[in-house]
Image (tube, helix red, strand yellow):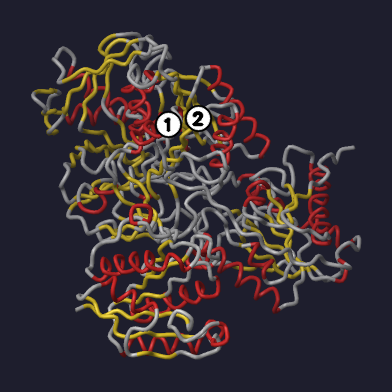
Amino acid sequence: MSKELEKAGLPVALVSAMYPVAEQVRANRIVKGVSIPHPCGDPSLPQDLDARLRREIVQTALKALEAEVTGPTVFTPNMAVSG
Amino acid sequence: MTTIVHVVNQFFAGLGGEEKAGISVGVIESTAGAARGLQSQLGPDFKVACTIYYGDNYFHEHSEEAINAILEAVRSHDAQALVAGPAFNSGRYGMSCIEICHAVATALNIPCVTAMHEENPAIGTYRDIADARVFCLPTTETATGMTDALKALAKFVSKLTRGEAIGPALQEGYFGRGIRRLERTDRTGADRAIDMLLKKINHEPFTTEIPMEEWDDIKPAPPLDDLKARNIAVITTSGVVPWGNPDRFKTYRNTHWRKYNIAELKALEPGKWEAVHGGYNVAYMNKNPHYGVPLDALRSLEADGVIGAGKLYPAYYVIPGNQGSPAVMRRVGQEIAADLKKDNVEGVLFVAT
Amino acid sequence: MRLELADYPVAEIRLGRKFEYRAGTLEVDQPALQETILRDGRIAEASLAVVCPGDRARITGIRDIVEPRVKASGNGQVFPGILGPVEAVGAGRTHRLSGMTVIATAEYEGTVRAGLGVQRSALLDSWGAGAAVSKFGGLLHLVLIMKLREGLSELDAHTAIQTAEFQVARRLAETTIGIEAASVEAFDLSQRHPDLPNVVLIQGCLTDDHHVHSGVSYYGLPIRESLSTVVHPNELLDCAMAVNATRGIGYFPITWDWQNHPLVLGLYRDHGRRLNFGGMILQRIRYETFHGKEVIAQNAAQLAATLGAAGALVTWLGSGNAFVDVMLTVRACERRGIATVLVTYEYGGKDGIDAPLLFYVAEADAVVSTGSRDRWLELPEPERLVGPYDRVQILSYPGAPVAQAQGKLTLDARDMVIGGVDNWGKESWICNAY
């Protein structure tokens, strides 16, 4: 699906915990999600840290949209938010 | 007497080389060029009623007119089957053969056979089209293999017109179209697995039943410059929808998509949304829909000026992604792309589970 | 550990007033069985029915299917940890009633709305197109039709259904005690041939660790997120593996499948002839992070290496991203020099033109296809309905439409038919490329 969006000229930042699957199907801008049932966050963290992690993941996705890429590229958010 | 028509390019009709590649579709009411060879391979029970030709360049510059003219010629000769090519390693010729076969099979419901070398790029199109009425046979790289190619084409088309069932690609020797049919075979899967494993351990040859696949590269869309000035939209396959599932999404194999308003919302309140999806533990998503639609984070980034004010699209798009057929997902992707472009969206945040 | 499996084939089932097995006919004390089932207060109503192959009957509300077995000698008893204490099984002599099944059907709505835990039931036709696609289509069935008390939790519902079906299954098999079997097969791995290659079976099991019953249990204990382990194949023959009895789904193996595992039986039959059956690895899959998937793949490959495997049959039960775990396992084994063959169903969509699998690794160069789970199915109208439902919910989302079970049905996959997907190669299905 994301490839059709890209064919139409829209850059897509794909957030997915299954990033090797995304790489295999040749999505171009891939952001590592936390886990399949909760890609944008971690319920085991306290609420404020979970929200901070989510912001970091979304910000990484936005950076991916701004990045020049030549093929499938994985962007890794900084998961260490409690520091 | 079975009636066949043979479609060839200008060169193989004997009309000339590159200098004649611009000629339009024509019909010779007898066998000409390669068609003579085909008739001789087919024998007296078959009649190649005519030789239809076209210029390679003409076809690619005027495909619609060319195909219509060819269809008309095939129709008017009451052909029971069509042979196109062989195209050997010519990509242009190969492509036109595939397109002609597909168009004729679709419009007239007659079987069509062509032939080309295994590295001809047109084979990719042949597989994408996956038309069960169109067959492509292997040939040598160059026209030195013409006689063998015509022999193979003649044999295959006579099988087709006799109404004989055509077996799997590996058995019958044609290029597979990627159509997989559920059938019974002679041994159980368990027996086949043990036999295959023993062959593999003993370094004996074996044939896998599901070959590995590869996907095509897509040229990356250009990056966004000046992010603050760009319209961004969110799409998710997590299945987060308003509570009650008003648009009746299934937990798997969905075929439609929807967008839901988030214009006035700063966050998604738990209890007002639910995740409809059969493929993962939806408990986390139900308690906090932001895991699939990170609206809180997006609003926070908007407040800080990372995303421009008012630049977050006022709705998010959703289709629960469990076991979605690739063909459906392609169509959904195209429809959503059109919707996004209509509203000037420039970048997409896609959250997948 | 030597187990003898004694076969008592059943050609006819009669609902009567006593329990007796004689010359292929099984008579069943119907009032006694009903009373046994209703002793569990969680079951409000219970009745029995017999369905024969060729009957124009449709069975609805199927939650699980089990083959009647009982241990005549040896330690422990069948369904250990569920019907009785946790005692090691797999030795001695066990009797089976072949040619028939006990089908547990139940009316139960559940409390989970969507996701992995939602309860599902399947159907089975005993004639026509529906029977032709199911491995249970040609067998005799004693059907338990149960209605559960309102408001039961998923765990209570599961326990009530499973206990009822297993008690009935064991009681039926007890009719064979003291009678000579039609045939006896021995299952013994103690002799190993030094010149034959060691082959192991790696059985991937998708389990839902967050839910009350994870979907696969060993001695009654649901398997949750855990590292791979080794079990003895004889334990499967003695019914030590079971499933979540509230969910009957065509692409998920049920209790009967574990009792009659075709890859276990196939490897056993070749043991000492073309290979040594080196053991069976249970591998819990569907880790939710890629890291987890990589670790479990390495772990299973390590166990296979520890068992001295020259080759491994790799198979799975599950759907979706659990397949990534399976493919990584193939890769991990191959990279250690363990030759693998993957046994799996394929997808492909309605017309067989979509991708057959969800994920690929280059090392998976030897794959056996057990056919597609996606092809549509048209079922004809039955003459008789058996089971708690006269309307069937073809799709399992909140608010899904229902169809009349008494009519023709168009199913968009084999999942709705119990036994409709051949997980482990029991049947001769394949997908041929055209």
Q: Is residue B52 above or below residue B214?
A: below
Q: Is residue A11 left or right of residue C205?
A: right
Residue B132 in percent (x, y) is at 37, 66
Q: Are marks 2 and 1 in contact (CB under 8 Å)?
A: yes
Residue flagged by tag 1: what amino acid is it?
A: Leu
Q: Is residue C164 above or below residue C53?
A: above
Q: Name the residue rendered at 36%, 58% in the picture.
A: C376
Front-most of C368 and B47?
B47
Q: CA distance from mark 2 to mark 1?
A: 7 Å
- Which residue is disc 1 drawn over? B197
Tell me the quadrant of the picture where the N terminus of chain C can be found. Answer: top left
Front-most of B146 and B161?
B146
Judged from the image, the secondary structure of the residue bearing numbered disc 2 is strand
Can residue C172 be seen?
A: yes
Q: Name the residue rendered at 45%, 44% in the picture.
A: C119
Please give the chain letter of the residue carrying mark 2.
Answer: C
- Which residue is disc 2 drawn over? C339
Judged from the image, the secondary structure of the residue bearing numbered disc 1 is helix
Res B305 quadrant in image: bottom right
Res A69 quadrant in image: bottom right
Neighbour class for label 2 at 10 Å: few (<14), some, many (≥20)?
many
Residue B300 in percent (x, y) is at 85, 58
Residue flagged by tag 2: what amino acid is it?
A: Ala
Residue A65 in percent (x, y) is at 80, 61
Tell me the quadrant of the picture where the C terminus of chain C can be found. Answer: bottom left
Q: Is residue C67 above or below residue B248?
A: above
Going by the picture, which residue comes out furthest to the front? B144
Q: Name the residue rendered at 31%, 90% in the picture.
A: B76
Q: What count of labels does the image hold? A: 2
Q: Is residue C41 left or right of residue A56?
A: left
